Amino acid sequence: MKLLCFDCDSTLSSVEGIDELARLRGPEIFATVEALTNDAMNGRILIEDIFKLRLEAIRPSLEDAAAVGRRYLATIEPTAKSTVDAVTAMGWTCVIISGGFRQAIRPLADHLGIAHVEAVDLYFGPDGSYKGFDEAYPSTRSGGKVEIIDRLRGQFAPERIVMIGDGVSDLETQPFVDLFVGYGGYTARERVKREAQAFFTSLAAIKTLI
């Protein structure tokens, strides 16, 4: 088995799911959350310092998560589906590793034909109201994607692991995978562009390296 691991936000889709949830709460909350997200993705603050803070400000409902799921599908990276289809035919198993939310990401994963999604579960009450999130999940904190990669390695014993993503949390996996590819099709983060082993602005380009 060979694993090709994709970040979701600003990689498989042009949007950041947490920002889209915040957008549903109006411009003031959106501006605050967007700034925090950018600071975390650029490595200026630790993701664990803001993860709960953002969600408490938004308190997303089950319907909000579904709305963001639709948004992901509407803003899918143009070559994502053909790339997943092509690399799957080449013998790779695709995985999504995200600090985003499983309920919102699942429709995009289903559309792409990706069965395995590593993402944070949101919790809802019987009426669909927000009741929290899985605070123990690795991708809620710095180094969490490395923990997930390590678990996948132990679970599947893959002969190769390739990771592609746009943020510093993705870049952290570089010493622990066979190849890390920085993605800048939507946001070219300077540190990622500078330090990544490879850097592309189209997901389709990954096929030239694996």
Image: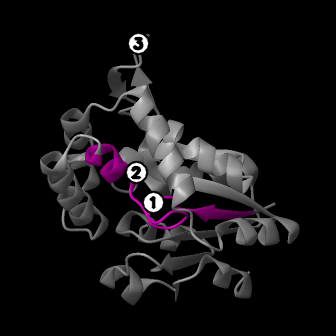
Q: Earlier in the sequence, mark 3 or mark 2?
A: 2
Front-lying residue, 210 or 159: 210
Query: Tags 2 and 1 in contact by the CB under 8 Å rule?
Result: yes
Residue type at mark 3: give it: Asp
Please report the residue visible at 52 percent of the width from the left and 46 percent of the height from the top. 70
Asked if residue 12 is among those painted magenta in the image, a careful observer would answer yes
- Give coordinates of residue 161: x percent, y percent: 67, 67
- Residue 171 in view in this figure: yes
What span is in magenta?
A: 3-23
Q: CA distance from mark 2 to mark 1?
A: 6 Å
| Residue 9: numbered disc | 1
Q: Is residue 79 above or below residue 5?
A: below
Quarter of the rendering containing residue 88: bottom right
Considering every residue shown, the one lying at the far top of the view is: 126
Asked if residue 28 is among those painted magenta in the image, a careful observer would answer no
| Residue 173: numbered disc | none
Can you tell which of label 3 and label 1 is closer to the viewer?
3
Q: Secondary structure at mark 2?
A: helix
Q: Is residue 107 above or below residue 40?
A: above
Residue type at mark 1: give it: Asp
Residue type at mark 2: give it: Gly
In this figure, which residue is indicated by the disc labeled 3?
A: 127
